[in-house]
């Protein structure tokens, strides 16, 4: 097993409905530890920069607008195989295809408003964590 860190974002649809505690309980129930956390309001420039990998996709502008529509909670999660554990508890992007016990199956409003983001690889996790957190903001 490999100790890893990954980024988690609780999206505006989740924060608007006060689901932070419920979602974090599911995350922590997998054995992951929240070692960094802050509630922020993304600017349009921040959202565009964070999701720049999707810039050429047709959903890019809608994604940016959604992500700036309300506060988000950005978090650093740590644990054994953190990237995969977080992806497993998030569930499929489309909540209709997500397994019943997952965050998206329980809380997502739609494929677009799917409540959470999680890094898709250890390499991207490192990049995404650095986007939002300095070393001093991560406490073990």
Image (cartoon, rainbow, N blue to C red):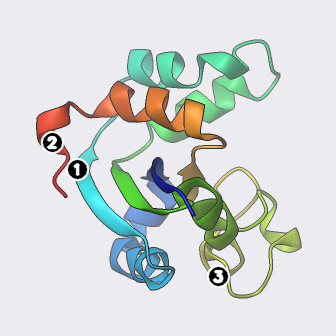
- Foreground mark, 2 or 3, reads 2
Q: Check disc 3 and report its element: helix, strand or loop.
A: helix
**Residue at the image point whose x is 34% and y is 68% from the top:** 33
- In the picture, measured across the screen, residue 77 lies left or right of residue 57, that is left
| Residue 137 place in picture, x, y as percent | 15, 42
Residue at 76% of width from left, 87% of height from top?
100
Q: CA distance from mark 3 to mark 1?
A: 23 Å
Residue depicted at 67% across the width and 78% down the height: 102
N-terminal of the pair, mark 2 or mark 1, is: 1
Residue contact at pointers 2 and 3, CB within 8 angstroms: no
125 relative to 32 in the view: left or right: right
**Element at badge 1?**
strand
The answer to whether any part of residue 65 appears in the image is yes
Determine which quarter of the picture holds residue 113: bottom right
Q: Earlier in the sequence, mark 2 or mark 3?
A: 3
* Residue position marked by numbered label 3 in the rendering: 106
Inspect this view and state whether residue 11 appears: no
Specify which label sits upstream in the sequence, 3 or 1: 1
Q: Is residue 138 above or below residue 35?
A: above
Residue 104 location, quadrant:
bottom right
Nearer the camera: disc 3 or disc 1: 1
* Residue 106, placed above or below residue 125: below
The residue located at (35%, 51%) in the rendering is 76
Q: Position of residue 8 (x, y in %)?
A: 46, 52
> x and y percent of residue 86 in the render?
57, 63
Which image quarter is the C terminus in?
A: bottom left
Q: Residue furthest front?
A: 1
| Gap between marks 2 and 3 measured at Cα | 30 Å
Q: Which mark is residue 38?
A: 1
Number of marks drawn: 3
The residue singled out by tag 2 in the image is: 137
């Amino acid at each position: 097993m490999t100790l890893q860190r990954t980024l988690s974002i609780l999206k505006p649809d989740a924060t608007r409905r006060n689901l932070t505690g419920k979602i974090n309980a599911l995350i922590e129930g997998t054995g992951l530890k929240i070692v960094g956390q802050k509630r922020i309001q993304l600017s349009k420039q921040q959202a565009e920069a964070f999701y720049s990998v999707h810039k050429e996709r047709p959903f890019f502008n809608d994604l940016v607008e959604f992500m700036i529509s309300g506060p988000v909670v950005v978090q650093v999660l740590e644990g054994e195989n953190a990237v995969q554990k977080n992806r497993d508890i998030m569930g499929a992007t489309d909540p209709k295809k997500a397994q019943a016990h997952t965050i998206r199956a329980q809380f997502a409003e739609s494929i677009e408003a799917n409540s959470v983001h999680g890094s898709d690889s250890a390499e991207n996790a490192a990049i995404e964590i650095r986007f939002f957190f300095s070393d001093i903001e991560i406490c073990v």
